[in-house]
Image (tube, rainbow, N blue to C red):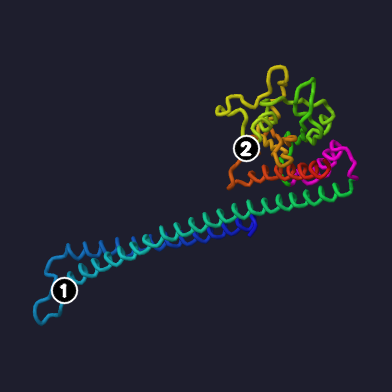
Amino acid sequence: MTDSELVEAEAALWGRLVSSLRKSSYWQVAIKIGLILGGAFIGALGGAMEGKLFASSGDGLVTLKGLLVVGGGASAFSGGVLLLLADWETPDLLQDARAYLTEVKRYLVERDGLLRLDDKRRALLEMQSDIYEACESLPRETPIDDVLRAILAVGSINLHAAIGFDVGERWAFSVFRLATVDSEEQMQRVAVHWAERGAEQLEGRNWKIKEGFTGWAWADAEEVVVANAYDAEWNGRFLAPSGKILETDVQKYVSAAAIPIIVGLEDRVWGVVTATSNIAGRFKRNPQDVRSQNVDTVRVLARLIATQVALRS
């Protein structure tokens, strides 16, 4: 059932309910006037008459007065019973309708979430397949930095679908490798794929240990998954240090997943794959949320890179 079909079904259901309630209200008015008020009037009229309710022996069972009183009372009583039955069924009917619609909407929300998840998983599988094929076509002597750029370039075809970025969202994928810069080990950016394609050519920032998302993933040799870097719980931990921070950082780097590239039996951090977005919650650890697969996409990319680094070392 599509959303439009649900809307049409809901409108039809409520239309039938309203029609039924209107008919019920007409009958209730008729019952109130015809049976209850009419019966009460007849009973009152009979009660106002002089004489006895029941006839004397040999003259019949009841008098006219008795007939009016008994008949009016019976009419009012039957009208009350009919109203009670009508009022008894109406709330149940409405409650059943509301429960049905709530259940249908819940099903549609779950179904849409699963469909989106299936689309994202399909894109992720296609990304893996494309990267495997591209890497197999590269000669073994290809410089590893060129291999990384090829992986990200090929993977970028399905990255957008695998993550599900919104239109206008400012996202970025960067691959860093451990390098010696100015006699100091740092994470140096060697490949990038950004929403703002023109900005990819700008010189990237290197990260020292415990600097930014990348530096902390390197320091702890563990995944860094942050729904919102500006939440109080992080106390500015992932913000760029003085001298590296840019005015536009707050507009770009809100949510992130930084996954270490682990190579070798010693679990050495060879590099880091860092994905960022300006949308809070784009990357999170909640298994019940569709967006949790966004982190899986970054993990897969890191594992594919680690495999190529190990094979070509």
The extreme top residue here reads: 243
Q: Nearer the viewer, residue 119 or 259?
A: 259
Viewer-closest of 65 and 256: 256
- Residue 146 among magenta residues: yes
Dot 2 surroundings within 10 Å: few (below 14), some, or many (20 or more)?
A: some
Indicate the secondary structure of the residue bearing disc 2: loop
* Nearer to the camera, 306 or 125: 306
Q: Secondary structure at mark 1?
A: loop
Give the extent of the magenta segment.
139-161
Single out the residue that lies furthest toward the front.
266
**Label of residue 48 in the image:** none
Q: Is residue 62 above or below residue 260?
A: below
Report the residue marked by disc 2.
281
* Residue for badge 1: 63
3D distance between C-alphas at marks 1 and 2: 84 Å
Task: Pinpoint residue 267: horizontal percent, then vertical percent.
Answer: 69, 39
Q: Quadrant of residue 295?
A: top right
Q: CB under 8 Å between callouts 1 and 2? A: no
In the drawing, does residue 268 fall left or right of residue 83?
right
153 in relation to 115, above or below: above
Say whether residue 4 is magenta: no
Task: Give percent across and percent down for residue 157.
Answer: 81, 45
Q: Residue at x 20, y 72 (%)?
A: 67
Query: Who comes first in sequence, dot 1 or dot 2?
Result: 1
Q: Residue at x 64, y 32 (%)?
A: 220
Which of 11/258 is in front? Answer: 258
Q: In the image, residue 7 lies at what x, y percent?
A: 60, 55
Residue at the image position 57 percent from the left and 60 percent from the top: 12
Horizontal relation, residue 9 to residue 271: left or right:
left
Sort mark 1 into few (<14), some (14-19) or many (20+) by Cα contacts within 10 Å. some
In the rendered image, the quadrant that contains the C terminus is: top right
- Which quarter of the picture shows residue 5? bottom right
